[in-house]
Amino acid sequence: MSFSALQNNDRENEHEIASEQQETEVVFRRHNVSNSEGLRRRSMRSSLQSAQRKSVSPTDDSVFAVQDDEDFSVFAKGRDYEPVFVTHKYTEQEKETLSSYESCDYLPSHSHIYKHWIKRQMISNIETDRWVMMGLIGFAVGFLGFLLHQLIERISSLKWSTTKEFLDDGKVAVGWMFCSAYSMAFAVFAAAVIVLWRPSAGGSGLPEVTGFLNGTQVKKIFSIKTLVAKFVSCTAAIGCGMPIGPEGPMIHMGAIMGAGLSQGTSEVFKFKLPFFERFRNPEDRRNFISAGVAAGVSAAFGAPVGGLLFCMEEVSSFWSNTLSWQIFFCCIIATSTSDLFNSSFQEFKQIGTFGGFQTSRYILFNVYDAVDINILMFIPSAILGVLGGLLGSAFTILNLKMTRFRKRRLASISSPGLVKVIRLVEPALVMARDDSKFRPATKEMKLCSHEGLEDAVFAWFRQAMAMKVPLSGPVVIGKAAEIAQLTNFKCYPYPQLGGKVQIEENKTNKQKKTTNNEQMNTHYVRGLY
């Protein structure tokens, strides 16, 4: 076909689109007068419904509780206790709350103007821009995970190194007070960021993201303010030692990165970039948010396949084969970026060659020697599985009961300021209870060791495994102490660092090697528990 023929076809298509638009405008004008009254009524009705929704929709789900569920018993089916074939039972207040949320659009606009605009975008068959966006999301989420882990390590290291200095000087009480105050201060700060500034960043964020990807519009969960609050609060809470992890928050932060980068707009900073405009539709936005969720899982666990499977099986409801490969590519970029930077830095200090991966940091379960097993081992394994399922179900039900009880008590308090104070005190009490288990070491229990002793203990450990010697924690610690005594070292268990064995040179040996003290590093006898 000649170039002139192509131009003629394009002109004919433009004339057809213009004529269809004119026909649509004429039809709309004909019905506009007759339907004006109905439009006014519908607009008034929709405004009233939106006002009702705004009054019902909770601003902070952490303290919102319905008051009409007291008639249900403790093990009422359909509430906290939900068997497989029993549908959840909603109260009237819960139904009103659910109706206050709006649903998301699934497909982009299919008007003639939008279709014509898409045709003129010169999109390639392989959609290079979509793959580039997936790579950008993966890199951004991976680098965000790197920053998160480095800051957590820095906060935690500062806490224990300062405590160690107090213990070395014999100031046991001061060390305990510093450790407790440090933990409680960071815990209260992490809670204050959420309670006083951004309630939408509370919790893991996974339920909100799952609800959005399944068609529910949840406000403020993809804002850049939510991202900043999530990052700061998560860093402070995990770094101070609270019993939580970064996996759930990384999923939410990955979703925010996917939503922000793909749309290129920000309501906070009031800008709209002239790039990737064709992705500003509900379908593409949802797909890129799914990619951010998968990248968050991959960066947190270092498992790109796990991130893809989690997003496909647990979070998203709309999927395709092409989307699988694109999200898998995003997960690979996220994992590679996070591992690449973490391999070279620890607490933002360079520890090795850029891109050099150490087995001690990335291999969690080293297997030195295989152990023969018997088919009878599956009997206690099955029993443990059944017990684990029963205890897990009981834990879930009790957790839901306690959460409902807490929300109901907080909702019964009329003063919002008092509720915020209580929510700030809660994490401080948790950390105070956790640090009450602090058992400081004596003056003689220093935190230093020598890698030669570690190698000796490891050699004995591998030999004992090969000879099938029954081992336990006390046996290994006793043997390590015996080896240390033969080599002029002392061996102490130090419970504050996860039960790892700490080694210290004798004073006589230390006096002989005072010039080498600066070259000594702390080494842990790993794998003994």
Image (cartoon, rainbow, N blue to C red):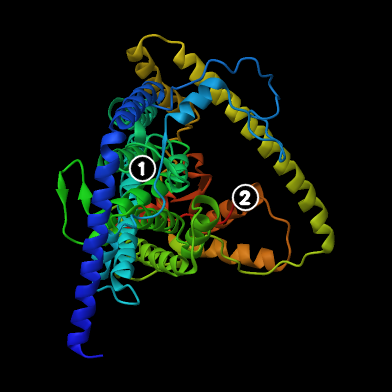
Q: Quadrant of the N terminus?
A: bottom left
Q: Residues within 10 Å of mark 1 (few under 14, many from 20)?
A: some
> Label 2 is placed on what type of residue?
Gly
Compared to residue 67, the image places residue 526 above or below, namely: below
Q: Looking at the image, which residue sits at the far bottom?
A: 2
Work out whether mark 1 precedes mark 2 in sequence or the reverse, and give the earlier one: 1
**Along the viewing direction, whichever of 423 and 318 lies nearer the viewer:** 318
Q: Quadrant of residue 290?
A: bottom left
Residue at figure coordinates x 24%, y 50% from the top left: 25
Q: Looking at the image, which residue sits at the far top?
A: 414
Is residue 351 visible in the rendered structure shown here? no
Q: Residue 341's x, y, as percent?
A: 31, 63
Residue at figure coordinates x 26%, y 35% from the top left: 33
The local secondary structure at tag 2 comes to helix
Residue at figure coordinates x 80%, y 58% from the top left: 377
**Along the viewing direction, whichever of 123 and 326 lies nearer the viewer:** 123
Picture disc at residue 478: 2
**Along the viewing direction, whichever of 219 and 53 lies nearer the viewer:** 53
> Label 1 is placed on what type of residue?
Ser
Q: In the rendered image, which residue does mark 1 sit on?
A: 156
Compared to residue 5, the image places residue 315 above or below, namely: above
Whole-number angstrom distance, CA of label 1 to CA of label 2: 30 Å
**Along the viewing direction, whichever of 96 and 462 lies nearer the viewer:** 96
Q: Residue 375's x, y, as percent?
A: 83, 63
Q: Taking 309 as reference, is 42 left or right?
A: left
Compared to residue 455, the image places residue 215 above or below, namely: above
Q: Residue 481's x, y, as percent?
A: 57, 51
Q: Residue 502's x, y, as percent?
A: 48, 49
